[in-house]
Image (tube, rainbow, N blue to C red):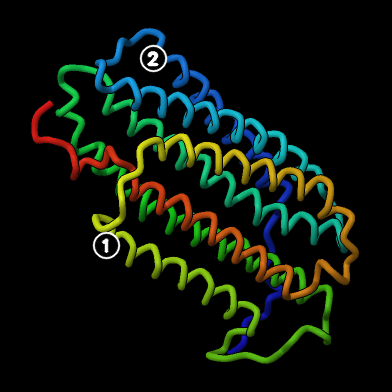
Amino acid sequence: MTPNLSNLQYDIPAAAGWFSSIAGVLAGFALLSILIPLDHEAKKESESRSVEAVIAFTCAFFSLLILAFSYAVLSGRIGDGPVQGVATYEQLLNGSALGLSTLLLLFGLHAILLSYGSNRIVFRPARGLITRVTRTLGPIIILSFQFSSSLDVEAYRARTLGQNYASASWLGLPVGILINLVIILSAIFILIVLSLLHKSLPQRPGIQCLVGELVLFYTVFVAVFCSLILPLLPERVLVMAGLEHGLVAITAFAVIAVAIAGMMDRGSPEDLPATS
């Protein structure tokens, strides 16, 4: 039985207000984390890790600060028609940027735990958990939320197009939903395979800095796209299946890229000596 997408109701502006608050709180944590090295002297051999942590936290701070304002703007998009379409796409893109920025905080935390304290070996299990979250579990959760957000886009298209909405289905699901599901499941499959083979990937010094800059660049791209381009698109473009699936694919690619960087972190717990 094909689900009735018009019944999918989600108050995006109301949820955006909460997301704005969450992003603001996380930005505050990132700002405080930047100051940690000022009061803690790192060991000589760990100075590079401290630099990577500071850059990761700095990029996360600016990214989360941008998202706090972006979600605040989204919370004010109230209305039907094109306004609703813009809001659904903003939710999709902002969600991926928020997820990646949160992972960036974990990147920085992982580097900090490697840098300070004679008892840092005690935190080895925590570092292992952080590594698994940044390279597999966290990205899978982000991708799952992205599929949920894509359902809101499909619901908007179904309500707008009415009888013109493609009614073709397979396994009881509209083709549009199936395409998004294939994109997300393919990305999750790639993540799982790469996670199993992560030891074969080369270790890259300074990968934390690269990840931080890429996530910040992605967040800026999302903010600019949602502010300057998306609101100006006509409704006939907003309801195009190609735009929806293309943006879902872009967000999935961004998540995979950050996960691969997590696997290439040269400070992974598996590669550390048993003692500090």
Q: Is residue 55 above or below residue 36?
A: below
Q: Is residue 158 above or below residue 126?
A: below
Q: Is residue 85 above or below residue 180?
A: above
Along the line of sight, which residue is nearer the eye, 1 or 136? 136
Residue pictured at 21% horizontal, 17% vertical: 117
Residue pictured at 44% horizontal, 54% vertical: 139
* Picture quadrant where residue 156 is located: bottom right
Question: Left or right: 141 with respect to 78?
Answer: left
Quarter of the image where the C terminus is located: top left
What's the mark number on residue 57?
A: none
Instruction: Give the Cα distance between marks 2 and 1.
Output: 34 Å
* Picture quadrant where residue 215 is located: top right
* Picture quadrant where residue 54 is located: top left
Along the line of sight, which residue is nearer the eye, 80 or 65? 65
Question: Left or right: 225 with respect to 118?
Answer: right
Residue pictured at 90% horizontal, 64% vertical: 234
Residue 237 position in % (x across, y down) = 84, 69
Residue 247 position in % (x across, y down) = 66, 63
User: Callout 2 environment at 10 Å: few (<14), some (14 to 19), or many (20+)?
Assistant: some
User: Callout 1 environment at 10 Å: few (<14), some (14 to 19), or many (20+)?
Assistant: few
Residue pictured at 40% horizontal, 31% vertical: 108
Residue pointed to by mark 1 = 197
Quarter of the image where the N terminus is located: bottom right
- Lower sequence index among marks 2 and 1: 2
Q: Residue furthest top?
A: 39
Residue 53 position in % (x across, y down) = 41, 27
Amino acid type of disc 2?
A: Pro
**Secondary structure of the residue carrying numbered label 2:** helix
**Secondary structure of the residue carrying numbered label 1:** loop
| Foreground tag (2 vs 1) | 1
Residue 257 position in % (x across, y down) = 48, 54
Residue pointed to by mark 2 = 37
